[in-house]
Image (spheres, rainbow, N blue to C red):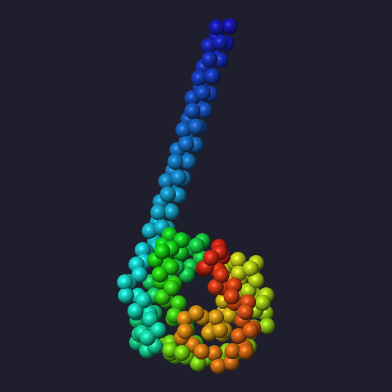
Amino acid sequence: EFGDLHGGGLRDVRERGRGQRIFIIVISLCALAGIGLGISLGLTKASVKDIVAPQDLSSTCSPGAVSTKRGYSTCESVCAQAECCRLPESHRKSCAESQADACEVFTTFCAILAFDHDGDGKVEIQEKVTVVAADPEIDVKCQWDRIASVDGYKACRDACKPGNCCLDEIETCRVTNPEMCAGYESCEILHVQQFVSVPP
């Protein structure tokens, strides 16, 4: 009986020791995984450089400045550093959320670059623009459920681009045929986008 008890005790000790070793191995693996994940996230975060809006950005990208090709090019070069602001937040190099304040400044003043409606490398003050007929599918492309995805948002934005002058608040263009603007009413949704959670 003593032998049986002694043998059973040894088995219990061995099993407890084995269980402890397994527990230690599992904890070690979890710790290693956590360290690896931390390093990965650290590298991803480090890959996004801080962006700083120049104090003279408002004048660099003013309507008067971008009315010349040289001024337009200068504004474009300065705004290029904020490319990460335009990337979806899910993108590893996006800074739209982590540097939201800087992105807001760049977005405000760099938006004027989109007003080169005739593609001549400058923004003419009160540029005359003839608006083409809107995409027949524009009302479908610019529905809320469509622009909730990155691809859907881009499809709506591209469809609305020919009618930008109809909706632009910055007075850099003048529509020569305003009756065509009615076809771009669905594009108002893009102006509301900045207040809701849809792709930037």
Task: Please give the name of the residue rendered at 41% of the width and 57% of the height, measured from the top-left corner.
Answer: 45
Residue 135 versus residue 140 in the image, above or below? below
**From this viewpoint, which residue is outermost toward the top?**
1
x, y percentage for residue 66? Answer: 38, 85
Task: Please give the name of the residue rendered at 43% of the width and 68% of the height, measured from the top-left corner.
Answer: 104
Query: Is 24 on the left-hand or right-hand side of 61?
Result: right
- The answer to whether residue 4 of the structure is visible from this angle is yes
Q: In which quarter of the image is residue 1?
A: top right
x, y percentage for residue 186? Answer: 63, 77
Residue 181 versus residue 142 in the image, above or below? below
- The answer to whether residue 80 of the structure is visible from this angle is no
Q: In which quarter of the image is residue 140?
A: bottom right
Task: Please give the name of the residue rendered at 66% of the width and 77% of the height, measured from the top-left corner.
Answer: 139
Task: Please give the name of the residue rendered at 49% of the width and 25% of the height, measured from the top-left corner.
Answer: 17
**From this viewpoint, which residue is outermost toward the left?**
55
x, y percentage for residue 182? Answer: 63, 84
Q: Which of 193 and 33 is in front in this view?
A: 193
Q: Nearer the viewer, residue 106 or 34?
A: 106
Query: Is 91 on the left-hand or right-hand side of 47?
Result: right
x, y percentage for residue 176? Answer: 55, 93
Total label count? 0
